[in-house]
Amino acid sequence: MNAVRPTHQMSALEKRATFGLASIMALRMLGLFMILPVFALYAEHLQGVTPTLVGLAIGIYGLTQAGFQIPFGMMSDRFGRKPVITVGLLIFAVGSVVAASSDSIMGVIIGRALQGMGAVAAAILALTADLTHEENRTKAMAVLGMNIGFAFIIALALGPVLNSWIGVQGIFWLTAVLALVAIALLHLIIPNPPNSRFHRDTEPVPAQFGRVLADMQLLRLDIGILILHMTLTATFVVLPLSLKEVLLPPEHWKVYLFVMLASIIFALPFIIIAEKRHLMKQIFVASVAILGIALCLLAYVHHSLIGIFICLLLYFFAFNLLESLLPSLISKTAHAGSKGTAMGVYSSSQFFGAFLGGLLGGWLHHYYSASSLFLVCAGLILIWFGLAATMRHPPYLSNHLLNVGELSQEEAGALNQRLLQIPGVVEAVVIIEDQVAYLKIDRKTIDSAALDELLVADKVHC
């Protein structure tokens, strides 16, 4: 038996569960993202519209999502994963119908708020953990993350196309249908877990919030993701309007699709280099700088199609790098056994940033200009740059879980001490209730044979 098996293959059930749940997550996020490149154009015709309310409509989902995602995850522990996910997707569908049926900006705001209330991400992650072995959980979470990224790319390109065919109201109706499709997938494709239990590698622990929020290194990353999504949402309050001045709206999809695909192709080698060559901080800080430069330039060239194109290419090159590096940095920085809590705070910061960005973008567009908005966003990035440049270099450690079975308090304490004595094990926390040992390991120096011998000696099977 090899205790550290990075090449361990997923079972057919694990693959089915992982890709099925990733599809459900992507369908929901696709619905949220498709209106981003087109809503500012559509909102001009709504009753009672003001630029501030347009920004609120774009970002309000982030406020309710941030507020409901952790409670929904906790409810799934008590009432079951599938029932809670089903209710969340139904709420999301109702919100989509409300937005689709509204001819006033306030109606759309209410619908968007309801969409955010259907916050099923935490419950989906918990169900994924229920249906995957500890050794394959990181792979499963990576698949979910990649699908969300693909949904974002497709949504930016698909939104303008669908807008020319069925309009924004039609997009909202389609979003409701996609939510119902996701419910069908949940009950027809996703297997029922043999048992549901708490997973602190994917779910937040309330008792750990104080420690996580007091960790200045994690806090820098949380502020970073907040500013990243704050500036993204604020930018899209005015970007479609600027693009409309130089390109017909039905053609906007070409810009978004090419920019997103090219930026991902350019970013991918740097993502690999950051991890393989231990240059994560350097590439991370450089990405923040490029983000700020792109926004600053956009303030002066947003009346030019070529200018917008170049700035968006720079922006999304940096954005894709940061979206990839930030979760990895959170995982590396969080202490063993607190990854789920750290990721919960991180996700809430991300959604709250989208809400603040909508408010800020709408307010600046109302009282100032598009140039002012881009410059203010660049100023926020400058603050983030200062936080990023002064952060510590991340430890290049991996999270590793061992299923240790039932142990007494004394046995758990003894096992914890012996685990820490194994070369390559930097942190170890044995949680009796979870029947899991949470480790932070250096994969280059880990003594797998010693870990095997220890587990066999203790009659613990991973």
Image (cartoon, rainbow, N blue to C red):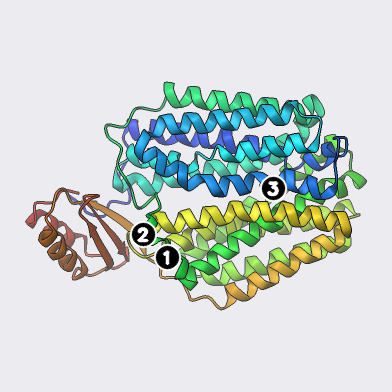
Whole-number angstrom distance, CA of label 1 to CA of label 2: 7 Å
Q: Amino acid at mark 3?
A: Gly
Image coordinates of residue 45 in percent, x first then y, are: 88, 35
Front residue of this view, candidates 420 and 202: 202
For mark 3, give the secondary structure.
Answer: helix
In-image side of 348 versus 411 (left or right) = right
Q: Residues within 10 Å of mark 3 (few under 14, many from 20)?
A: many
Q: Amino acid at mark 1?
A: Gly
Mark 3 or mark 2: whose residue is earlier in sequence: 3
Q: Amino acid at mark 2?
A: Ala
Mark 1 or mark 3: whose residue is earlier in sequence: 3
Disc 3 vs disc 2: which is toward the camera?
2
Q: Which residue is mark 2?
A: 207
In-image side of 220 versus 157 (left or right) = left
- Asked whether the residues under the numbered discs 1 and 2 touch, taking CB atoms below 8 Å apart as contact, a structural biologist would say yes
Q: Is residue 278 visible?
A: no
For mark 2, give the secondary structure.
Answer: helix
Q: Identify the residue at horizontal 59%, vertical 39% (top origin).
A: 29
For mark 1, give the secondary structure.
Answer: helix
Q: Which residue is mark 1?
A: 210
Q: Identify the residue at horizontal 65%, vertical 29% (top origin).
A: 175
Question: Which quadrant of the structure image shows residue 160?
Answer: top right
Disc 1 vs disc 3: which is toward the camera?
1
Above/below status of 257 relative to 380? above
Q: Which residue is mark 3?
A: 59
